[in-house]
Amino acid sequence: MILKKNYWILLCVVIVPVTAALFFLQNCKKNRVEPNVVLIVLDTLRADHLPFYGYKKETAPFLTKIASQSIVFDNAFAASSWTAPSTASIFTSLYPFQHGVTAGYLASKFHRTRLNRIPAKIKTITEVLKEKGYKTYGAADNINICEKIGFTQGFDRFKRFPYEDESKMNRHLEKWSLEMKAQKKYFLYIHYNDCHTPLHKRPPFYREQADHLADLIAQYDSEIHHVDAKIKEMYELFGWEENTLLIITADHGEELKERGRWGHGSTLYSEVIRVPFLIYFPGKERRHKRIRENVGNIDILPTVRNYLGIKSGETEAGVNLMPLIKGKNNTPGDRYIFSHLLKQKRKGKSKKVIHRATIFKEWKSIYREQSRDSYKREFYNLLTDPGEKVNAFMENKSLASRLFIKFISFEKKCKKFKQETEDVKLGKKKMEELKSLGYVK
């Protein structure tokens, strides 16, 4: 009897505190003040020109500081190498061939272009957070981030700027700041365009170089330093150190003459689809961790949903990264990440070229299809050949074919939305803006 009595006393001693602790944690989670959510997309910023991704020059001192307190994804890939399709994938967690935005604005001799738009049936990250009670704000200075392509869905306030200088956009955000700070919670999307052509020689960061290519890269690096200062300005103005979930990524990178070209939207090599991606958590939840597993910036929406306790979307192609962040890796080890590019040709019989890239562990397959009878296959080991210089397709035909088949299989079976298009007449001013950005067909 004494042993039995002692057993129940011991059981109470163990269970009561544990139950109380669980009750306390549950109430804390319920009573947690929901943070502001800030998404910053840095147009045309490749990961390997940032110090915390191994670049030898100090191009981004503020972002380096933020990264030291953030979850940094070492191998993050964009869904395309064009602004419109890639950013639409960030907004929807769908690949371009799913949401239908496969191109953006292009200047042509006919002064007309055909635009795809995000279908109204798809809930963007803005609409998801608006339903959660967030006041929503957006500012962008890339011509593609506009109403006609569907990016303004769900925003209470949205302003697009012609690309001139981020200072003008920051001044506008300052005008919103008092209103925003008065909100219980807000979502803010900022799309900075500094690293995009036309490049500027930003003082005091720019140093002239004798070699033409080196000088162009110096200009590109000075633009990174310039936008880094603009992000710091907004961080301090809004006080994002306190109660803010801050996510920073890029829509795509930039070719810096590695293959004889300068620009983007022509290939799916790492210089244009490997992007920076970091998550800076609010206050006491903040931690620093580097994650080597492959991820996509299509994973942003599912991750934000999970963090805020919002039910997962039924059609999202991205995955929730919170288990990976917490060290409870439930993402499958055989995850395949895709990138897609529909390239309009300027000459030749076939007007379109489709590029499909599949990333699996350290392997990457690129399949470029010009017609049923004309295609090129490439295969790279990203660990031993990060610059993708040696096409190893012939030595790895079986694995390369497996990666390609995974893309085609997903493309056939996945949920796709009916493509919505609109013919747009381009005025003289818009034509000039498009040409200055290199958006020419």
Image (cartoon, rainbow, N blue to C red):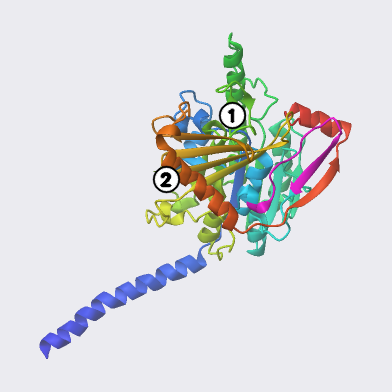
Q: Residue furthest bottom?
A: 1
Q: Residue furthest front?
A: 373
What residue does disc 2 label?
A: 293
User: Hey, which quadrant is residue 144 in on the image?
Assistant: top right
Residue 41 at least partly seen: yes
Q: Is residue 76 above or below residue 314?
A: above
Judging depth in this view, the residue of 205 and 335 nearest the camera is 335
Residue 70 in percent (x, y) is at 46, 44
Residue 254 in percent (x, y) is at 60, 30
Residue appearing at x 50%, y 52% in the figure: 282
Packing grade of label 1 (10 A; few <14, some 14-19, many >=20) is many
* Magenta stretch contains residue 106: yes
User: Which numbered tag is attached to residue 224?
Assistant: 1
Magenta stretch bounds: 98-116
Image label count: 2
Residue 334 in percent (x, y) is at 41, 51
* Magenta stretch contains residue 332: no
Q: Give the residue type that dot 2 points to.
A: Glu
Residue 431 located left or right of residue 241: right
